[in-house]
Image (tube, coloured by chain):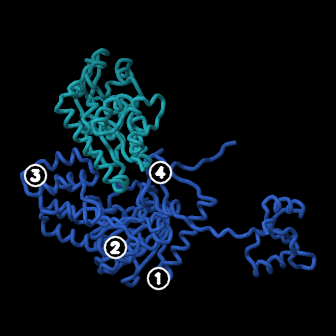
Amino acid sequence: MSLKIALTKGRVEKKVIPLLEHAGINCVPLKNKKRKLIIQCNNGEFEFILAKGPDVTTYLNAGVADIGIVGSDILEEQQNEQYELLDLETGKCQFVLASTADFDVDSPERKIIGTKYPLITKRYFESLGQDVEIIKIEGSVELAPLIGLADAIVDITETGTTLKENNLKIFDYLNKISTHLVVNRMSLKQHSREIFNLTDQLEKAVLEEKSKGELSTDENL
Amino acid sequence: MHKINLPLGTRAEFGERAVKKQLLITKLQQYLQKRNFMKVNTPLLEYQEVFTNFDLKQMRTYQLLDKNNKTVVLRPDLTLPIARLLTTTNIKLPQKFYYVGDLFKIAKELSGRNNQMTQAGIELVGYSSLKAELECLLLINRISQKWLNGQVKLEISHAYFTDSILDSLTADTALKEKIKNELYRKRIPEYQRLIKRFEKTTSYVFLQKWPRLFGETSAIKKMLIGIKLPKEAAHFLNETLAIAKLATKLPNQKVIVDLSIAPPQPYYTGITFKGFVDEIPEYLFSGGRYDQLLESFQAQPEPAVGMGIDIDLLAEVITVKSTQREKKYLFFEPDQIKEVAEQLLQDISYELLLEDDLEKAKKKVRLENAALFKISERGEVENVIKNSSN
């Protein structure tokens, strides 16, 4: 029996591999995966499934993966129902409200907000007591206020560089984001020893990496 | 041509799957009938109020308005309608009930989940004895033995354990709710942040261990060595461990205890239990004691225990031995209808051939290697083709 781990491919994958190695997983097959999407590690003890972030939660909810490694932004937007056992403290970034310099967050009219995260945006403006119109955008969210599609955007930023380069200003900081380890509820019952072992090893790895200061490149805003 | 598809979250059942499900339901009903349970059927539609006292957020319902503009819902739960029934009729208690029926909950769109589910269950109303819980566990064990090779694991919990710990910790209701929520969802980073404020108290060791407090009884006892629980919590723990111990006496039964899980429904007031099989990502059985439920329908509180069985999931995973019998066809002419009726009275295993002429019928029967009989002119059954495997 191997533990099935749905790993968000791309940036999350790259940042998490050192932690997995630290936790005793031989990640060579994962690094040399080429175009393969299912990769066995440690002689089949772990099976990694590479997926897009939002699909990681779908796999977990359907019970086809035991563990998911995914950004907390997606967990929040998708209203995750599974167990969040660990903050891997990598892939750190933050939600921001941004727009062109002339935007006024306190102006009385009903604003149009462009975002990839409608639920998080809705909750944020509700907390301000404002009802806004939300336009779901799939990519290059920064464009929305520049081309007149929206008054402002709610998006993720790591360093703020893209926003700055597009002459956008940050008006407010929302939730902080990092990569989390999520576990299917039933899997935790069925494979508790294996899953807690991995979680404990990863927790140690996170602490050690932190003390080495290796995560300082992962700077917050 | 425009074809009309099914609404999202619904499915049609046919063929093998439908047969297996029906067979399961039939066997289960026969069993419960023999054990003198009373069958209850409640309507699919109920007034919304039947469910409003309980967390409807967890169960988004299909709603519609009746003629008087009152909201009716397609029932999202089968226990509450029975509680409603008991408060509006004079059914004598104590009584053991069983039901099989469909319930409706709206799942997230495009998530691959069904909105219509079939559930069977038993409700033992008017029984305060621990034996009521045991009757439920006996049924789970029997299903496990009969259809699941004894693979079902029982999980025993107590609906009040969490509150008894939190009440001894703080009077801050909002904080208690937050901790409970994060504990139940096992959002460990957030949970740890919340319990940090109790770092200097004697409860802290327990609080740290709490999210992992599930497993075999011996493991739980080991984790609790050196920890003094508040009096009430210790009482609920002992009750849970006692039931778990009894459950291990059932034939071929694995039992775990979970002290960190949310009760299956908000109306439970005592021992709760669930059953699952490894490698299947959902619970098959879930139930518990709900002594206050009838009171919430303005009736006398009545001790009760109930449990539900996920029939769709169970039908998917059980191995039912299908008795493959030899196929035999009967060909007849329309004016032989009387003889056909007489034959079927003697032997119901004939499949009637509806083909117009005998030649066509023979072709079909040969393709299937089946046997063919026909009604002769003298009105007798005559074997035309013998089964080729004979």
Residue where numbered disc 2 is placed:
B247
Q: CA distance from mark 3 to mark 2?
A: 36 Å
Tag 3–tag 2 contact (CB < 8 Å):
no
Given the image, what chain letter belongs to the residue carrying mark 3? B
Residue where numbered disc 3 is placed:
B198
Given the image, what chain letter belongs to the residue carrying mark 1? B
Q: Quadrant of residue A123?
A: top left
Q: CA distance from mark 4 to mark 1?
A: 34 Å
* Mark closest to the chain's N terminus, 2 or 4: 4
Against B155, residue A71 (above or below) is above
Query: Which quadrant of the rendered structure holds the C terminus of chain B?
Result: bottom right
* Mark closest to the chain's N terminus, 1 or 2: 1
Q: What secondary structure is marked by label 3?
A: helix
Q: CA distance from mark 1 to mark 2?
A: 20 Å
Label annotation for residue B113: 4
In the rendered image of this protein, which colour is used for chain B? blue
Residue where numbered disc 1 is placed:
B35
Check chain identity for marks 4 and 1: say if they share one. Answer: yes
Circle 4 crowding by C-alpha within 10 Å: few under 14, some 14–19, many from 20:
some
Report the residue at 13% width, 69% height from top. B231
Check chain identity for marks 2 and 4: say if they share one. Answer: yes
* Mark closest to the chain's N terminus, 4 or 3: 4
Check chain identity for marks 1 and 3: say if they share one. Answer: yes
Residue B172 in sight in this render: yes
Q: Is residue A96 left or right of residue B94?
A: left
Query: At label 1, which amino acid type do we have?
Result: Arg
In the rendered image of this protein, which colour is used for chain A? cyan
